Image (tube, rainbow, N blue to C red):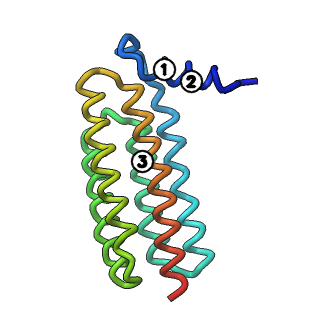
Amino acid sequence: MLNFKDGISLIKHMMNPKNKNKIVDHEILYYSSFMLLIPVFFCVYKNIYISAIITFYLFVTSITYWRDYNNKFKLSFDHFIIIINFIYLYYISSQINKYIYINMFSITVILIFIVSEYYVINNNNLTASNLWILIHMYLCITLLMIYNKKSNI
């Protein structure tokens, strides 16, 4: 059984600069994209079908990109769908008068992106990958919060 000290040593190992240039298993990023199905199913359950479709497109582009993460076209298309989702989320936030959700999400994602790029530049891809998994989880939670408020109006 994993105890607290083992968890701390694992985190120290992941953050250690000596572990640079390790081959990163991007499969976990591929599987973390499946978390986006949770807001899709929630939207279908709450009859918010446009939100479900837009989030489903994000899910499809995410798994398509992480299956072949060296393809620049897939990356560009994924970024395009992300921008569409941000515009839609700002629109939803204006309807429910809860800009705080999307503003907090935007600031957090920008900061995580900058830190992740710092780790990529320094060839610490493992930490950058873990930050992208964090973004997937945070996006899922934010979408659920926004869509829950939308379903109540």
- CA gap, disc 2 and disc 3: 22 Å
Residue carrying label 2: 8
Q: Which of 144 and 31 is in front in this view?
A: 144
Q: Which residue lies furthest to the top in this view?
A: 18
- Quarter location, residue 21: top left
Q: Which amino acid does label 3 sit on?
A: Ile
Label 1: which secondary element: helix
First-in-chain label (2 vs 3): 2
- The secondary structure type at the circle numbered 3 is helix
Residue at the location (59% across, 70% down)?
42
Question: Seen in the image, is 24 located left or right of residue 84?
Answer: right
The residue identified by callout 3 is 135
Q: Which amino acid does label 1 sit on?
A: Lys
Q: Mark 1 points at which residue?
A: 12
Taking the spot 41% from the left edge, 49% from the top edge, the residue there is: 62
Q: Give the residue drawn at x 36%, y 70%.
A: 100
| Classed neighbour count for the residue bearing mark 2: other residues with Cα under 10 Å, few (<14), some (14–19), many (≥20) | few
Contact check, label 1 and label 2, Cβ < 8 Å = yes
- Kindly identify the residue that appears in the image at 57 percent across and 81 percent down: 47
Percent coordinates x, y for residue 132 in the rendering:
40, 41
Image location of residue 142, percent across then percent down: 46, 62
